[in-house]
Amino acid sequence: MAAPRDAESQKVDIWKDVQNYYGQVLKTSKDLRTNACVTVARPVPKHIREALQNVHEEVTLRYYGCGLVIPECLENCWILDLGSGSGRDCYALSQLVGEKGHVTGIDMTEGQVEVAKKYLDYHMEKYGFQTSNVTFIHGYIEKLAEAGIQNESYDIVISNCVINLVPDKEQVLQEVYRVLKHGGELYFSDVYASLELPEEIKTHKVLWGECLGGALYWKDLFFLAQKIGFCPPRLVTANLITIQNKELERIIGDCRFVSATFRLFKLPNTGPTERCQTVYNGGITGHEKQLIFDANFTFKEGEIVEVDEDTAAVLKNSRFAQDFLFRPIGDKLPASGGCFVLESKDIITDPFKLAEDSNKKPKCASSVVGGCCGKKRSC
């Protein structure tokens, strides 16, 4: 009986350390000791940049980096933000879902929740809404039921580099699966390790706070997703993390870290889906000409793209279904452009490979946001 109590005690210690790090130690992103929070991501669409600019200055100031976790096709959606911190992403999302949508933020650091709640009326009035479409909850992301989050109540769950701060990541993913509607997705950025972490890293307080000590071995994400019932994780972006501290470099040794964004979909059990041809109709706000769905699939308006079974299942059974035409392979589709044959492309699942490949390409410095971590680090 002693072991479970010891494990629970360890969780409590980690919660306290994280709360202290983000509530007391960190005042702004300048206090961070690695670049886990400020790695570069892909360009941000204009409508999202404008939404971010409308967020109150204090809310933005208390945001600790970690890039952007705002997916596409958001109108009227119900969204849950795990580790919402000062509420920056919640307030940006509240504009994008519109007055008929809703955004809930949950965070375990009371000080951060207080900052977020302080500006509910400010943003409601700024957006011209009759009532606020944002709610903030003080609670733990691995205990969503205790926070009153109901089964199958959200279209999308986002998390901005917070899951790594929770000891029991499987419990977090199980709770996310429970609260998602069928066809819903978890769209999240986090930090991943190149190998199973040794105890010296796992128990280092600063490395936990910097999103490294609790990083999941990247292959374990695929194992957990399958175990819980999600579709295979879809890699979106990835960036290598550098350690700007000699002491921390010594402790980390040969282990490497990457910040990466993945999409995990919860689909209804409709049986196997066959490969097919798709045509994107260009109907998604901010992505009218092309939809960069993930690192492997970009859909240009009116262009035929052949997709594998998993991708076909996701597109047909999620909120994206209305934005695509589907036909069996071999049928002629009313579209212009070439057909990309699936056999000729390698599907990338390894975030380290993607990050290394991305480093070889020239980057544009404008209109980008950090790739991950620790946006609020407050679970």
Image (spheres, rainbow, N blue to C red):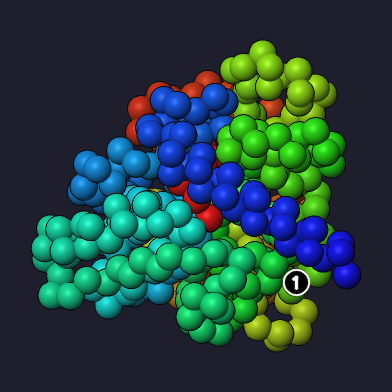
Q: Residue, x 75% and y 40% (percent of image)?
A: 202
The reply to whether residue 314 is in sight is: no
Residue at numbered disc 1? 228
Nearer-the-camera pick, 342 or 139: 139
Pinpoint residue 144: horizontal percent, then vertical percent: 55, 73
User: In which quarter of the view is residue 61 placed?
Assistant: top left
Q: Is residue 267 left or right of residue 325?
A: right
Q: Amino acid at mark 1?
A: Ile
Nearer-the-camera pick, 203 or 305: 203
Q: Residue, x 59% and y 53% (percent of image)?
A: 15
Q: Residue, x 15% and y 70% (percent of image)?
A: 129
User: In which quarter of the view is residue 131 placed?
Assistant: bottom left
Q: Is residue 354 left or right of residue 286?
A: right
Nearer-the-camera pick, 103 or 10: 10
Q: Secondary structure at mark 1?
A: helix
Q: Residue, x 56% and y 46% (percent of image)?
A: 18
Relative height, residue 115 to residue 211 (above, below)? below
Relative height, residue 111 to residue 76 (above, below)? above
The reply to whether residue 39 is in sight is: yes
